[in-house]
Amino acid sequence: MRTYLRSVPAVFAIVVASLTWLHGQEPAFDLIIRGGRIVDGTGNPWFAGDVGIRGERITAVGSLAGAKGRREIDARGLVVAPGFIDLHTHSDQPLLDDGNAESKVREGVTLDVIGESTSVAPRDGLPEAKSSWTDFTGYWNALKVKGISINVISEVSFQQIRLVVKGYNPGAATPAELDRMKQLARRSMQEGAWGLVTRFESGGPEYPEEVIEVARVVASLGGVYASHIGSEGMEQDKEIDFAIRVSDEANIPVHIFHLKIRGKPNWGTVGRYVAKIEAARARGLDVTANQYPYTAMQHQWAAFFPVWAREGGPDKFAALLRDPAMRRRIKEDKNFQTWVMEHGGWDGIVLGRARRPETKKYEGMRIAEIAKARGDEDPADTCLALMSDENGSITGMFHTMSEEDVRLVMKQPWVSIASDGSAINLEADGLPHPRSYSTNPRVLGYYVRDQKVLTLEDAIRKMTSLPAQILGLRDRGQIREGFAADLVVFDPATVRETNSFERPKSYPVGIPYTIVNGTVVIDGGNHTGARPGRALMGRAFKAPTSSQ
């Protein structure tokens, strides 16, 4: 017995030593990406190194030759970059429909920003066929049910707030209504919204003081202001002037969606608007913009119809379109004629998505082609007849911009890359814009490698640290220790789009890995099914109490 007791300390020492040895052999990282060309997002030249990830964070950058990871990715010959941040998307419902966000993660996007003319909230008192929530908290909870493969941020739409308060009733807000609008903006920010977003018709807002008052509330809560300007053509001066005015009077950073010029008579004038923004920045206003790398845009055909025809809401618009007298009035309207021209004319306007089989057969065709196929003498009559048949709900693409203007805007240091697309898959209805699948690969392949419009480092900056700076994100958009492990690994020699306007539904090539919050979502070019994404809350966010 005495001998046994004397041996206990020795056995214990052996066990402790064994555990210590085993502990020493445990991998220091959950994931190591080895030997890549690290483009860290700042715009600095690439450098060779490794990236070590533990949990959801980057914990080491540099040489990790002696370290071990539970999993290791060989990135020799590949670029390792921060995950791409898309500042302008319409992924709100698509993320609920398919949380895999295939079109986004396959092109290296790890964060989508949603919200524009409408946002997911507030919806107090509004009949919504596809949702059961009224506020942002309800939408965040809906995302959690099935999970999402990317992160998401939402702005709150001024138009959405106004719709809750006034419905489709015209006229300025009363003092009580304006107070309610400001209350909804404050509530939305406290529920996690990042800022205020607007979308105007040509010429800007009808009641600018309302927008500025709501923007002041958002500014006081640390938010940003983003604006989709309506004309991008004949009245762009007024619209950009108003965005700059908001920055000045509300003391808030302003971000302009897809800076461009449309309508062939306007080509070559975009430099004027670049200079206007440069002048605002020179006097200390934080004004930035984004851009998608295409010469065609996409939205509802309704956008080129007169405001008076649409202002009563979709049901009244549909009823109006069924009235032959109203169709004649629309056809003769000067704004309709101007906005058709700005959208590319009858030879440039494409039918992208319809609902009725009789109309769907024209998907992918331009209105002039459809008119010829139908035997219509005037394409305007074709457009109005189809819109009447579809209750005003046709979506289309519009070939209306010049390549030279796209390149000029792309070179501006304060312009980020953003898609204006959605997180969709190959089963998407109709003819989507190719930007939903290939915005970033098109820049990296066509504009960087082939055309040399941008350097690789600057292009990645425009997709990562610049959008993070615009949003005020403090832990994403760069490859740095302590930052979130949102990363993309791609081959600079082969990355490219595989789709076109005529055949948009295909994924890019040359992007074998996308990592979201430390989890590999695209692995060897395949989606793993992982859904590690989450909603990221704005600065004013207040977590709901258990009683709420």
Image (cartoon, rainbow, N blue to C red):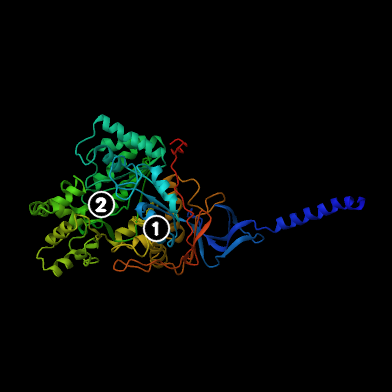
- Residue furthest to the right in view is 2
Q: Residue lying farthest top?
A: 175
Q: Is residue 76 above or below residue 324?
A: below
**Which secondary structure, mark 2?**
loop
Between 300 and 201, the one nearer to me in the picture? 300
Tell me which amino acid carries mark 1: Asp
Q: Could you tell me if residue 414 is visible in this image?
A: no
Residue 399 is situated, as x and y percent measured from the top left of the image, at 25, 62
Residue under pointer 1: 98
Of circles 2 and 1, the one toward us is 1
Left or right of 261 on screen, residue 436 = right
Question: Which of disc 1 and disc 2 is earlier in sequence?
Answer: 1
x, y percent for residue 343? 22, 57
Q: Position of residue 452 (x, y in %)?
A: 40, 64
**235 relative to 11 in the view: left or right:** left
| Between 501 and 18, the one nearer to me in the picture | 18
As drawn, the residue found furthest toward the left would be: 325
Label 1: element kind: loop
When asked about the image quadrant of residue 214, the answer is top left
Q: Residue at x 87, y 53 (%)?
A: 7
Residue under the image location 14 percent in, 66 percent down: 371
Amino acid type at image mark 2: Glu
Name the residue beneath numbered marker 2: 232
Q: Residues within 10 Å of mark 1 (few under 14, many from 20)?
A: some
- Pick the residue in front: 61 or 362: 362
Image position, residue 122 (x, y; %): 33, 41
Rendered image quadrant of residue 425: bottom left
